[in-house]
Amino acid sequence: MSEDLKTRKPDEVVDVRGESCPIPEMTAGKKLKKMKQGQILEVLTDHQPAVDVTLPSLAKSNGYPFTIIKDGEVYRFRIQKVS
């Protein structure tokens, strides 16, 4: 994983705290489609299954690098659109 993902300011942020699956993945997928190559999306979520399963699955299926930053009770799931 790129250190850039942890340190660079995200280009877009979606806040899906309080939402359960499949909302975090669907929201992230829609936003990523509108983003340009090289941009970073940060998904704020407090839904553990989204962090453990659905968001990593979304990133991997598209070949996008990702990282997870734990911030108290919230996860900052960052995905970089690379194609």
Image (tube, helix red, strand yellow):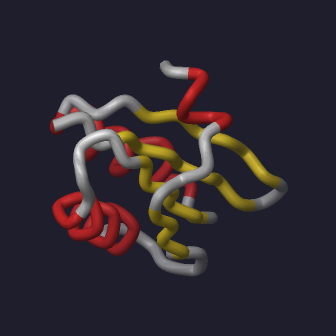
Tell whether 45 sits left or right of 35. Answer: right
State which quarter of the image contains the C terminus.
Answer: top left
Q: Position of residue 67 (x, y in %)?
A: 53, 34
In which image quadrant can residue 23 be found?
A: bottom left
When the figure is inspected, residue 3 is found, relative to residue 22, above or below; the finding is above
Pick the front one: 56 or 82: 82
How many badges with numbers are in the image? 0
Q: In the image, is 19 to the left or to the right of 22?
A: right
Looking at this view, is 47 or 72 the one in front?
Answer: 72
**Residue at the image point whose x is 51% and y is 67% from the top:** 13
Position in image of residue 56 (x %, y %) = 37, 39
Q: Position of residue 16 (x, y in %)?
A: 51, 75
**Residue 73 against residue 55 in the figure, above or below:** below
Q: Along the horizontal axis of the image, is 6 left or right of 55?
A: right
Residue under the image location 48 percent in, 71 percent down: 14
In terms of image quadrants, where is residue 18?
A: bottom right
Report which quarter residue 34 is drawn in.
Answer: bottom left
* Residue lying at 56% horizontally and 28% vertically, measured from the top left: 4
Q: Position of residue 22 (x, y in %)?
A: 31, 69
**Residue farthest along the right direction in this orientation:** 72
